[in-house]
């Protein structure tokens, strides 16, 4: 089967020559970057905050927690991201969300699986952050669900794409205070009744494309914990480098 798979990929490369997913330059194999785009990507690596995955300029002390997580512990245990959210990662994420470049989910998932390998080893179930039904209708797909399925396939972990439901549309969060974000997201998510048993007692890895302030992920994590989940971790494609200086807009985690 492995040989058949290799031959199939070779045939695909002949029919559809591989291109860099970021800039479109010809590359050697599907899903790989050209040298310039690879060099521009900012991978999230140690040292980083154990709580929210925010990279440290220097080691974060014995607790390995940022000041924000010390003051306001998140609802989840650990968060990890593949990339920093910048121009290079936006060239992968925004076309996925807004230009129907669904093949980018596979590229991002490869690096998410690398960044989140410890969390994936402990996860019983992967759950994506849901879209509101009207946004899902207009877009035609949920990018977080595509990422969850691709990561789950690589890690051999089950995925429940419809465990969570977004009960109402929410405003853009960037102009709101922390209290305003919490109020805006209060009651915005629920566990579907038919998925209650799938969630209860499970170690869940929440999947999304971007983590900014963590308000959306936190609301989802609290909803899952209230439904009986054992604990929640978070894995995303990209992490805003410092949420104090970045507003959440429609290109970040406002879905």
Image (cartoon, helix red, strand yellow):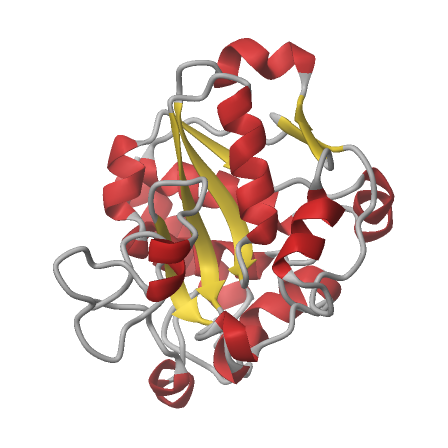
Q: Residue at x 31, y 70 (%)?
A: 55
The structure residue drawn at horizontal position 52% and vertical position 59%, both measured from the top left corner, is 211
Q: Position of residue 216 (x, y in %)?
A: 61, 49
Q: Residue 155: image x %, image y %?
A: 32, 38
Q: Residue furthest bottom?
A: 36
5 relative to 102, above or below: above
Q: Nearer the viewer, residue 30 or 110?
A: 110
Task: For residue 239, say whether it is visible.
Answer: yes
Where residue 210 sits in the image (x, y, percent)? 54, 60
Which residue appears at 34% of the width and 86% of the height? 39
Give 16 or 215, whichever is nearer the viewer. 215
Total marks placed: 0
Q: Is residue 201 left or right of residue 142?
A: left
* Left or right for 141, reference 213: right
Q: Quadrant of the N terminus?
A: top left
222 vs 124: above or below: below
Residue 119 in which image quadrant: top left
Question: In the displayed structure, would residue 255 be above or below residue 16?
Answer: above
Q: Is there any visible trace of residue 52 in the rendered image? A: no
- 117 left or right of 226? left
Quadrant in the picture for residue 226: top right
Q: Is residue 56 above or below residue 52?
A: below
| Residue extending furthest toward the left | 62
| Residue lying at 39% horizontally and 70% vertically, measured from the top left | 32
Residue 244 image point, x, y percent: 52, 74
């Amino acid at each position: 089967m492995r040989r058949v798979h290799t031959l199939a990929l070779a045939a695909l490369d002949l029919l559809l020559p591989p291109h860099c997913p970021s800039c479109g330059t010809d590359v050697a194999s599907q899903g790989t970057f050209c040298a310039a785009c690879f060099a521009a990507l900012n991978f999230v690596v140690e040292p980083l905050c154990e709580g929210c995955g925010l990279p440290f300029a220097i080691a974060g002390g014995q607790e390995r927690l940022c000041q924000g997580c010390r003051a306001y512990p998140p609802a989840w245990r650990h968060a990890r991201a593949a990339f920093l959210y910048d121009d290079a990662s936006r060239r992968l994420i925004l076309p996925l969300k807004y230009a129907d470049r669904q093949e980018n989910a596979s590229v991002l998932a490869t690096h998410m699986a690398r960044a989140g390998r410890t969390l994936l080893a402990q996860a019983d179930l992967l759950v994506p952050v849901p879209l509101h039904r009207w946004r899902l209708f207009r877009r035609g797909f949920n990018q977080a669900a595509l990422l969850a399925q691709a990561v789950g396939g690589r890690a051999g972990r089950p995925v429940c794409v419809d465990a969570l439901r977004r009960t109402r549309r929410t405003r853009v969060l960037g102009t709101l205070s922390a209290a305003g974000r919490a109020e805006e997201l209060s009651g915005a998510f629920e566990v579907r009744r038919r998925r209650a048993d799938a969630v209860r007692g499970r170690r869940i890895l929440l999947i999304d494309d971007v983590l900014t302030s963590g308000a959306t992920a936190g609301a989802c994590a609290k909803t899952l914990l209230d439904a009986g989940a054992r604990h929640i971790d978070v894995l995303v494609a990209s992490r805003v480098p410092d949420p104090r200086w970045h507003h959440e807009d429609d290109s970040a985690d406002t879905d």
